[in-house]
Amino acid sequence: MTEDIFSSGFNRRNLLKLAAVAAAAVGTQAASGSQAFAEQELSLKGKRIGISATGTDHFFDLQAYNAQIEEVKRLGGEPIAVDASRNDGKLVSQLQTLIAQKPDAIVQLLGTLSVIDPWLKKARDAGIPVFTIDVGSTNSLNNATSDNWGIGKDLALQLVSDIGGEGNIVVFNGFYGVTPCAIRYDQLVNVTKYFPKVKIIQPELRDVIPNTVQDAFTQITAILNKYPEKGSIKAIWSAWDIPQLGATQALAAAGRTEIKTYGVDGSPEVLQLVADPNSPAAADVAQQPAELGRTAIRNVARYLAGETLPRETYVPALLANKVNVGEVSKKLGIG
């Protein structure tokens, strides 16, 4: 039998390779089984988990917020969920209240770092484990987030490609103090510096909260009046897609649909515009907010069970453009 094997072109090295592959397959199956088992064993029974949201008026925020509450309950814990309604004073107050309640952990969803970080530190100093979603704080044990470096780079490359590597672009940059927005903006700048014919129109626009859509509509309408010639502006970029929505509406109202818009988050109404071949919405990077929320809570459970966590846990994001938006929407379970 052995002679037949070797005479058929096999040798000892081939057999060793086959053995190694088989062992690796078994190891992979065991690892997958262990991971599945670990997922089943996660529990927050008897635990109180503070969930602090900066606001829930945006699709991303609401999805991540609700997913956290549901996941805490699913794992047997008690959620203490509070929403600051985009008010920094209220946000500070709710963090103070959560710290006083001494939950087993606090998860902070978004927020301007200079506002929330002192209170995240106070929570840590009080012995409360702190977790975050899309917040780059040194006081967070783990930050559940999308790869914002990749998001910023991919969106910028899509934009530059679409405009042929040259032209003026309008940029909304109102929330540089919010870590994901800052990273995405920096990546836009990093990419465009290698395309010297791409120019960011100065001064940059500042997106606002609340009334984001109407404000973006108004600002873009004013910019179009300042640059009335077709071709004088090639694209409009924003770090999230609600300003993109207002900008797209302004372009349609002014008949300037030759200008393309870009944003991040994957709000259903924006993905619908990307899907419309006549809309200037050219691309939107779709995050998975509900999965980010669930991931954050699972990481809380892992930490409380004694596991060591990485500094950040990344949840994949999907770049939707005119070509693949149907496929991306289907993956996200959107319309």
Image: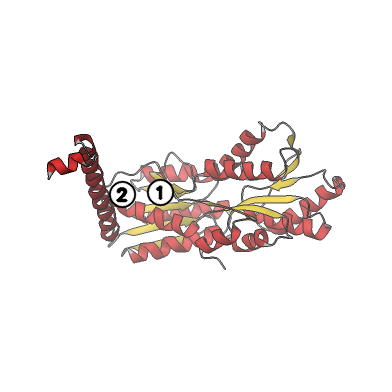
Q: Quadrant of residue 277?
A: bottom right
Q: Is residue 301 above or below residue 334?
A: above
Residue 170 drawn above or below residue 84: above
The answer to whether residue 56 is seen in the rendering is no
Residue 66 vs residue 108, the one in the foreground:
66
Q: Sort mark 1 into few (<14), some (14-19) or many (20+) by Cα contacts within 10 Å.
A: many
**Can the viewer see residue 116 in this picture?**
yes
Q: Locate the C terminus by quadrant.
A: bottom right
Q: Earlier in the sequence, mark 2 or mark 1?
A: 1
Residue 170 place in picture, x, y as percent: 74, 44
Residue beneath disc 2 = 303
Q: Secondary structure at mark 2?
A: helix
* Circles 2 and 1: CB atoms closer than 8 Å: yes
Q: Relative to the observer, which residue lies in front, 38 or 296?
A: 38
Q: Is residue 156 above or below residue 197?
A: below
| Tag 2: amino acid | Tyr
- Quadrant of image for the N terminus: top left
- The residue under label 1 is 131
Q: Residue at x 28, y 62 (%)?
A: 45
Tell me which corner region of the image, top left, top right, bottom left or bottom right, holds residue 209.
bottom right
| Residue at position x 74%, y 38% in the image | 166
Alpha-carbon distance for marks 2 and 1?
10 Å
**Quarter of the image where one finds residue 42:** bottom left
Q: Give amino acid for label 1.
A: Phe
Question: Percent from the top left, x then y, of residue 156?
Answer: 63, 42
Relative to 26, is 89 on the left or the right?
right
